[in-house]
Image: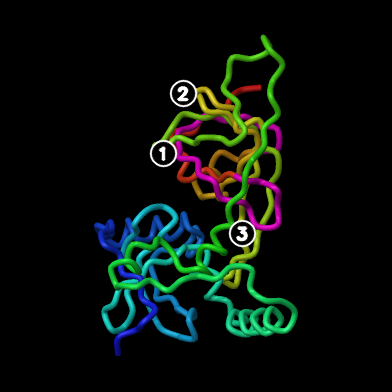
């Protein structure tokens, strides 16, 4: 069966192996940090309920899934994560009924006239709405002139590669994991800064991995390390950035 809703990628980056797939799914929040293997997911959009697998990505905000019939479809990772909830279909139906009863649509969307036009769209309407809900602007106050040489901006431009960072442990906590019976252990940091380019990040978080546990960190400890930092909010906490795979960790002496 050919699905009419498909937005097939014109080109995309296929995962080299399962390790690359596992790491990207963790970064998107589709798998827990403790996961050691990938799994199948459910696509519940457009009235469908289909098993799918993640085979690659167009960019960091556009995953590519493959359905059972072999068709590939572009989707926002956060929207795919929402689909895994058992209440997803009921919530979408209730919202649609409420919108129909209470108001007329504010925007009329034209249907693409050709399959090529449809393929050029990076995401469906509902995926775009999900992206908007999951995108946050971080406002950073301008530092007094002459006080610091580090860069500050209305919205942080994070490096794409691993960088050297410094951070101080603020709190140890746990957050719910929708894909596991156990909560995930995490560390929240304060005074997080990047060495090169010089950027003051503020607060960030990371998984409390086995490597970090070996250091026997305590609140107030400052560490230097190399890692990748991405814009990913911590569940139920006002922490907008996540530190992935910290390595070469050193605890500074007090």
Dot 2 corresponds to which residue? 196
- Give the class, few, some or many, for how many residues have Cα within 10 Å of label 2's Cα (few <14, many ≥20): few
The magenta stretch is 218-240
At which x and y percent is residue 158?
49, 36
Q: Secondary structure at mark 2?
A: loop
Q: Tag 3 or tag 2, which sits nearer the N-term?
A: 3
Residue at x-position 56% and y-position 46% = 206
Residue 228 painted magenta = yes
In this picture, residue 73 sits left or right of residue 110: left
Q: Is residue 88 above or below residue 217?
A: below
Res. 202 image quadrant: top right
Residues at marks 1 and 3, CA–CA distance in whole angstroms: 23 Å
Dot 3 corresponds to which residue? 133
- Give the class, few, some or many, for how many residues have Cα within 10 Å of label 1's Cα (few <14, many ≥20): few
Picture quarter with the N terminus: bottom left
The residue positioned farthest toward the right in the image shown: 102
| Towards the viewer: 147 or 236 | 147
Q: Secondary structure at mark 1?
A: loop
Q: Secondary structure at mark 3?
A: helix
Dot 1 corresponds to which residue? 160
Residues at marks 2 and 3, CA–CA distance in whole angstroms: 31 Å
At which x and y percent is residue 179?
54, 71
> Is residue 200 at all visible to an observer of this figure?
yes
Res. 247 image quadrant: top left
């Amino acid at each position: 069966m050919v699905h009419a809703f498909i937005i097939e990628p014109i080109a995309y980056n296929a995962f080299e192996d399962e390790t690359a797939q596992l790491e990207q799914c963790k970064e998107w929040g589709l798998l827990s940090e403790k996961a050691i293997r990938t799994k199948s997911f459910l696509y519940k959009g457009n009235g469908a309920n289909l098993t799918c697998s993640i085979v690659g990505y167009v960019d960091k905000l556009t995953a590519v899934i493959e359905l059972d019939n072999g068709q590939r479809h572009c989707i926002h990772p956060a929207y795919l994560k929402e689909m895994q909830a058992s209440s997803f279909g009921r919530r979408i139906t209730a919202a649609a009924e409420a919108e129909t009863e209470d108001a007329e649509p504010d925007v009329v969307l034209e249907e693409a006239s050709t399959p090529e036009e449809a393929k050029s769209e990076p995401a469906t309407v509902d995926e775009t709405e999900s992206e908007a809900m999951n995108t946050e602007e971080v406002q950073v106050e301008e530092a007094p002139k002459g006080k610091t040489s580090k860069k500050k901006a209305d919205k942080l431009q994070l490096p794409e590669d691993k960088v050297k960072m410094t951070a101080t442990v603020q709190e140890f906590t746990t957050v719910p994991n929708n894909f596991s019976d156990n909560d995930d252990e995490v560390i929240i940091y304060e005074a997080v800064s990047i060495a090169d380019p010089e950027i003051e990040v503020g607060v960030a978080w990371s998984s409390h991995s086995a490597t970090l546990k070996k250091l026997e960190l305590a609140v107030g400890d400052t560490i230097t390390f190399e890692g990748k930092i991405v814009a990913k909010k911590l569940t139920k906490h006002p922490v907008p950035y996540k530190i992935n795979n910290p390595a070469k960790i050193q605890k500074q002496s007090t």
